[in-house]
Amino acid sequence: MSRIELDGNKKTLDTNGVFHSLLCVDGAGEIIYGGESYPFAKGDSYYLPKEIGEYEINGNAAVLISRI
């Protein structure tokens, strides 16, 4: 598990063939994938399939990412 602190800058991540679980523990932001934006706020979670590949997260938030 890793904690990512977002301060308004985009961060590019890659599932690298591994399932990702994202949990926003503070603030708010968005996941950007395939030309679509998926908003999140404190307490929200997203589950990203391993086939996603590269995606971005953006906002002012703290996000926990588990790789399974």
Image: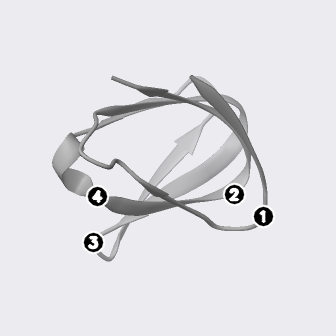
Q: Is residue 14 above or below residue 17?
A: below
Say what secondary structure mark 2 lies in. Answer: strand
Residue 29 in the image, given as x and y percentages of width and height: 62, 52
Q: How busy is the neighbourhood of tag 3: few (under 14 within 10 Å), some, or many (20 plus)?
A: few
* Residue placed under numbered mark 4 in the picture: 53
Disc 2 marks a residue whose amino acid type is Gly
Could you tell me which secondary element the residue under label 4 belongs to? loop
- Residue displayed at 78% across by 64% down: 8
Q: How far apart are labels 1 and 4 at the CA level?
A: 22 Å
Does the CB distance between marks 1 and 2 fall below 8 Å?
Answer: yes
Q: CA distance from mark 3 to mark 1?
A: 20 Å
Which comes before the other along the chain, label 1 or label 2?
A: 1
Q: Position of residue 9 (x, y in %)?
A: 74, 67
Residue 43 in percent (x, y) is at 58, 23
Q: Which mark is residue 34?
A: 3
Task: Report the residue marked by disc 1.
Answer: 8
Identify residue type, mark 4.
Gly
Question: Which numbered disc, 3 or 1, marks the residue that appears first in the sequence?
Answer: 1
